[in-house]
Amino acid sequence: FFFYSLFTMPIKENIPISERIKNFSNPCGWGCSICCAVYSTWGVLMLLVIGFLTRQEYRGIDGDIPSIEDHSEAGKHAYYAAIIYAFFIFISVARMVHLVILGRRAKAAPNMDDYTS
């Protein structure tokens, strides 16, 4: 019971989860998108290098005891993983473009304070 009370926060308002989801306007901002894009770019680069070295049967990939049975198949799977990482780069960049569009719309929207005298 003591540990449970340390890790739970008291809820002051009883708001249904459906309302919480509606009011969650920005789940992924600039920081999240940039972080995902940078790590995905690094993943693509590393997987391309690993795929290339594996297909060339570079001995440093296996070490002293060979553990890869089919080097061309392992290299192909590394390329597939790089494609998946590239898809996440695309999603991150698309979210950043979406945030730019949302920012422009917010600036272009008329504000009621502009109409006051």
Image: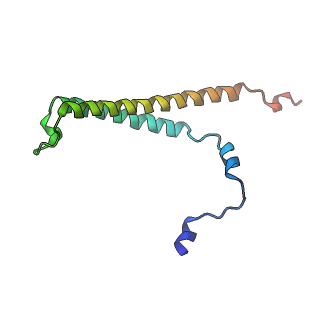
In the rendered structure, the answer to whether residue 51 lies left or right of residue 92 reads: left
Image quadrant containing the N terminus: bottom right
Q: How many marks?
A: 0
Question: Viewer-proximal residue, 115 or 18?
Answer: 18
Residue 56 quadrant:
top left
Question: Which residue: 35% across, 35% down?
Answer: 42
> Residue reaching furthest right?
117
Question: Which residue: 68% across, 26% down?
Answer: 105
Where does residue 58 sit, x and y in percent of width and height?
14, 33
Determine if residue 83 is in view.
Answer: yes
Question: Viewer-proximal residue, 37 or 117?
Answer: 37
Residue 67 quadrant:
top left
Question: Viewer-proximal residue, 94 or 31?
Answer: 94
Image quadrant containing the C terminus: top right
Question: Which residue: 33% across, 31% down?
Answer: 80
Where does residue 2 sit, x and y in percent of width and height?
54, 75
Determine whether 3 is above or below 102 in the image.
below
In the rendered structure, the answer to whether residue 20 lies left or right of residue 3 reads: right
Where does residue 91 sit, x and y in percent of width and height?
49, 31
Q: How is the image coloured?
A: rainbow
Where does residue 28 sit, x and y in percent of width and height?
56, 39
Question: Which residue: 15% across, 39% down?
Answer: 60
Determine if residue 53 is in view.
Answer: no
> Residue reaching furthest left?
64
Residue 88 quadrant:
top left
Question: Viewer-proximal residue, 96 or 53?
Answer: 53
> Residue reaching furthest bottom?
2
